[in-house]
């Protein structure tokens, strides 16, 4: 009974794939450095590199959308497709999500996707964002975030939807939801994910203040599970993965589903309204001006 409802839920979460693969090169397979058999072949796309290890059942998925892994529509799409590919391959039980770009895990929404764009584009973009969150939050795989760089806003959403987070101990690698500082508001499903992770009071403060936590504070508030020296992020993520994979899949998956279903269902019930809300908010003149000013500030900060 529990299994059947878990399966139905997972099916509902598998929403339509998009036919929007502008400029993507999905499905490419190439030998991993060091060669080897099938288990050592890497695949992926232009912006997502997947290094599968069939022997351990774990794949490392690297975001590579330089310079800062901003979540462009293409990156969102390629992430969903790569994850789906691993989920459909019974060889794999876990994924380590990390960055291929130096110093940045993920800079969050690609602001150029929502600045000066028409409502239809903003809607398409937001649906892709919802889809990635639903897919990661409800994934049957164990997802471990190996956070090897800055992790603001949308980057933090991705990390929070994993099962476990390991952050590199570098004061520049801050993590959190800083939306208010851009003049925008985290959607309810993002707020819910925050509350589920660090509790109501801490979320209330952090969301309003747009706090970006340095590693020690992120650990203290419970936003990450481990903070380790930068050169140990990957190995620690693998050790964490082993701990999670020691649990029988069906029991862990059904428990995950039980813990996360209500939060995901809330978005599934109001997905269109959430999209409309996002579009009408983000297309306001005043919000467009704030976003433009923020982007300009980022560009001028250089050097
Ligand atoms: C109802 C409304 C609901 C809205 C909910 C929305 C939920 C999610 C929101 C978001 O995710 S908003 C995005 C928030 N992200 C940030 O605030 C991060 C901004 N970036 C940075 O702080 C820094 O770039 C960094 C990530 C710490 C990296 O610093 P670094 O010094 O390594 O690089 P930079 O020189 O700053 O940047 C290089 C290059 O990249 C551009 N860029 C940076 N971030 C973004 C971005 N999010 N989108 C688009 N472009 C970005 C930056 O402008 C530079 O561009 P160039 O000058 O080289 O052209």
Image: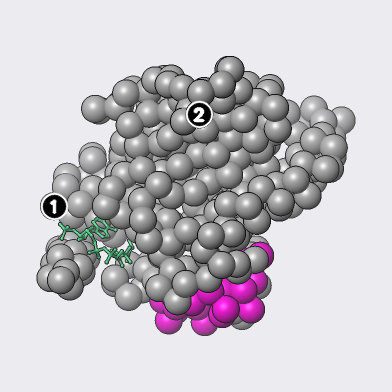
Residue found at the very far front of the displayed protein: 34
In the rendered view, does 185 fall on the left or right side of 35? left
Separation (CA) of disc 2 from disc 1: 45 Å
Ligand 1 quarter of the rendering: bottom left
Q: Would residue 223 be counted in the magenta stretch?
A: yes
Identify the mark at residue 34; answer none if there is no mark.
Answer: 2
- Residue designated by label 1: 116
Q: How is the image coloured?
A: one colour
Q: Nearer the viewer, mark 2 or mark 1?
A: 2
> In the figure, 94 relative to 174: above or below?
above
In the rendered view, does 195 fall on the left or right side of 6? left
Quadrant in the picture for the C terminus? bottom left
User: Reading the chain from its start, which is encountered first: label 2 or label 1?
Assistant: 2
Residue 159 visible, this orientation: yes
Q: Quadrant of residue 285?
A: bottom left
Question: Mark 2 falls on what kind of element?
Answer: loop
Residue 275 visible, this orientation: no
In the rendered view, does 252 fall on the left or right side of 154? right
In the rendered view, does 66 fall on the left or right side of 252? left
Q: Position of residue 13 (x, y in %)?
A: 58, 34
Q: Quadrant of residue 49?
A: top left
At horizontal 16% and vertical 47% (from top left) the residue drawn is 117
Question: Mark 1 falls on what kind of element?
Answer: loop
> In the figure, 275 relative to 50: above or below?
below
At horizontal 80% and vertical 27% (from top left) the residue drawn is 4
Magenta residues?
203-225
Majority secondary structure of magenta residues: helix
At horizontal 23% and vertical 40% (from top left) the residue drawn is 121
């Amino acid at each position: 009974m529990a299994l059947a409802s878990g399966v139905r839920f997972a099916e509902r979460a598998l929403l339509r794939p998009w036919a929007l693969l502008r400029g993507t090169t999905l499905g490419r397979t190439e030998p991993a450095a060091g060669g080897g058999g099938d288990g050592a072949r890497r695949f992926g796309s232009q912006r997502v590199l997947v290094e599968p290890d069939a022997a351990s059942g774990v794949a490392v998925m690297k975001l590579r959308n330089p310079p800062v892994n901003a979540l462009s529509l293409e990156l969102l799409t390629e992430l969903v497709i790569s994850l789906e590919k691993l989920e459909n391959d019974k060889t794999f039980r876990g994924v380590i999500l990390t960055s291929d770009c130096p110093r940045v895990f993920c800079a969050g929404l690609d602001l150029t996707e929502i600045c000066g764009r028409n409502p239809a584009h903003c809607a398409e973009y937001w649906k892709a964002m919802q889809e990635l969150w639903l897919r990661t939050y409800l994934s049957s795989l164990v997802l471990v975030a190996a956070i090897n760089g800055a992790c603001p806003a949308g980057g933090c959403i991705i990390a929070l939807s994993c099962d476990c987070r390991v952050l590199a101990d570098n004061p520049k690698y801050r993590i959190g939801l800083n939306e208010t500082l851009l003049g925008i508001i985290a959607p309810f499903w993002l707020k819910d994910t925050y509350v589920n992770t660090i509790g109501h009071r801490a979320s209330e403060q952090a969301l309003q203040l747009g706090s970006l936590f340095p590693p020690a504070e992120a650990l203290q508030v419970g936003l990450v599970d481990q903070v380790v020296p930068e050169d140990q992020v990957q190995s620690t993520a693998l050790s964490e993965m082993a701990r999670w994979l020691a649990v029988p899949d069906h029991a862990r998956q059904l428990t995950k589903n039980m813990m996360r279903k209500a939060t995901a269902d809330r978005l599934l019930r109001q997905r269109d309204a959430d999209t409309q809300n996002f579009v009408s908010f983000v297309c306001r003149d005043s919000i467009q001006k704030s976003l433009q000013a923020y982007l300009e500030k980022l560009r001028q900060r250089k050097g």
